[in-house]
Amino acid sequence: MTELILASASPRRKELLCQIGVVFTVSPSVIDETPISDEPALRYVKRMAQEKALAVYPQYADKDCCVLGADTIVVSQQQVFGKPKDKADAIRMLSSLSGKTHTVYSAVTLISEQRQEQIVSATEVTFRDITMAEIEAYWVTGEPKGKAGGYAIQGLAAIFVENISGSYSGVVGLPLMETSQLLTEFGIPVLALGLD
């Protein structure tokens, strides 16, 4: 059976793959995630997902396997919000997202010996107005660290979300409907846990 390798250390992506019953091995990628000058957001997220998969694939090239690379970014008013560098950066991001609609792009690349495919989900998320006191309190929880846009929709930041249109799991970090279709195309069983 073809083995799936997840080129990510993200606990959210691991949980999401487990949620749909996929058997996989984790092998985190280490790449430079610096955007190229004037690189459009969509091109950046697609490049990151591809480069993460390509960075890990050579380690498994002699095996019957597929490598999954994924990346998620928040885009607001043509600005890409990655993971906040520090408290000030998180405050800047959340203040900017407050009371507005932003787009979350999640790109997934799957690579095998025979081929390479990619999908991207785009989800519109609208935040209610958030007070500075709420942003400060949210930072103290530690949740914004390491999250694109400085928030986790599946966590405490759910209280900020007024509306969502698109893939909820895509905002978390891995669009499950699209990912499951891609895995099936590559012969990776979905809903496989408990099956012999």
Image (cartoon, rainbow, N blue to C red):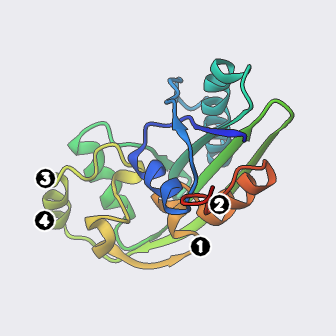
Please name whichever residue, 100 or 195, is drawn nearer the observer in this view of the structure. 195
Q: Could you tell me how far apart the alpha carbons at marks 4 and 2 are, in whole angstroms?
A: 32 Å
- Res 69 → quadrant: top right
Query: Label 2: how many residues lie within 10 Å, few (<14), some (14-19) or many (20+)?
Result: many
Please name whichever residue, 86 or 7, is drawn nearer the observer in this view of the structure. 7
Q: Could you tell me how far apart the alpha carbons at marks 1 and 2 are, in whole angstroms?
A: 8 Å
Q: At numbered mark 4, what does the secondary structure look like: helix, strand or loop?
A: helix
Residue under numbered circle 2: 121
Residue under numbered circle 1: 166
Contact check, label 3 and label 1, Cβ < 8 Å = no
Q: Identify which residue is drawn at 30% across, 60% down.
A: 95
Give the x, y percent position of residue 9.
Answer: 43, 37
Q: Identify which residue is drawn at 59% across, 55% down.
A: 105
Q: Identify which residue is drawn at 54% across, 60% down.
A: 194
Among numbered discs 1 and 2, the one appearing first in the sequence = 2
Q: Could you tell me how far apart the alpha carbons at marks 2 and 3 are, in whole angstroms?
A: 31 Å
Query: Label 4: how many residues lie within 10 Å, few (<14), some (14-19) or many (20+)?
Result: few
Give the x, y percent position of residue 166.
Answer: 59, 73
Please name whichever residue, 64 or 138, is drawn nearer the observer in this view of the structure. 64
